[in-house]
Image: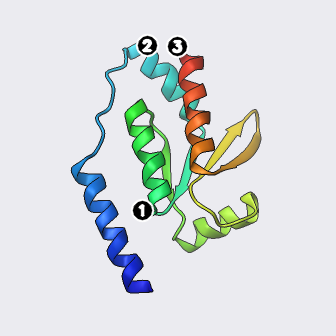
Amino acid sequence: MFIIRWVLGRIILFFDFIFAPKKPNHSDELQAKLDEQTRSLQLYQFAACPFCVKVRRDICRKGLNIKLVDAKQADNRQELLNNGGKVQVPCLRIEKDGKVEWLYESNDVINYLEELIIEAK
């Protein structure tokens, strides 16, 4: 099973690289607003996870600068478990007004990021 997952993961990464989405050309003002809104966001993810690839591609399509955190590293994985409650990726860590929220599920993360774009415009 490990070999099958490894091979499929490499295929996913290959096609993600070949068909990488283009970043939009935001105005400098809009990009500055987006950068400010996303400064406190972190995406906990696995490189070859198809749902993580889906979210990363959406982040790129939207031109967002969000810190990516590799959840396979033991300390990051433990932080995700301790603070988020479970080791499930993709998970968006949202720090707002001193409070931290953990948002799971790729579609929920994409919808949250879409709301950020709407607010910035």
Marks 1 and 3, how far apart at CA: 31 Å
Which numbered marker is on residue 47? 1
Q: Is residue 38 above or below residue 57?
A: above
Kind of residue indicated by mark 2: Glu
Marks 2 and 1, how far apart at CA: 31 Å
Q: Residue at 44% across / 59% down in the picture?
A: 50
User: Hey, which quadrant is residue 76 in on the image?
Assistant: bottom right
Kind of residue indicated by mark 3: Lys
Q: Does the residue at mark 1 contact the one at mark 3 (Cβ under 8 Å)? A: no
Q: Residue at 48% across / 51% down in the picture?
A: 68
Residue 42 x, y percent position in the rendering = 56, 47
- N-term-proximal mark, 3 vs 2: 2
Circle 2 sits in a helix, a strand or a loop, which is it?
helix
Q: Nearer the viewer, mark 3 or mark 2?
A: 3
Counting other residues with Cα less than 10 Å from the Cα at mark 3, is it few (<14), some (14-19), or many (20 or more)? few
Counting other residues with Cα less than 10 Å from the Cα at mark 1, is it few (<14), some (14-19), or many (20 or more)? some
Q: How many marks?
A: 3
Residue 120 x, y percent position in the rendering = 55, 17
- N-term-proximal mark, 2 vs 1: 2
Circle 3 sits in a helix, a strand or a loop, which is it?
loop
The residue that label 2 is drawn on is 29
Circle 1 sits in a helix, a strand or a loop, which is it?
loop
Kind of residue indicated by mark 1: Ala
Q: Is residue 72 above or below residue 119?
A: below
Q: Is residue 50 above or below residue 56?
A: below
User: Hey, which quadrant is residue 39 in on the image?
Assistant: top right
Image quarter hosting the N terminus: bottom left
Front residue of this view, candidates 17 and 29: 17
The residue that label 3 is drawn on is 121
Counting other residues with Cα less than 10 Å from the Cα at mark 2, is it few (<14), some (14-19), or many (20 or more)? few
Q: Is residue 116 left or right of residue 96?
A: left
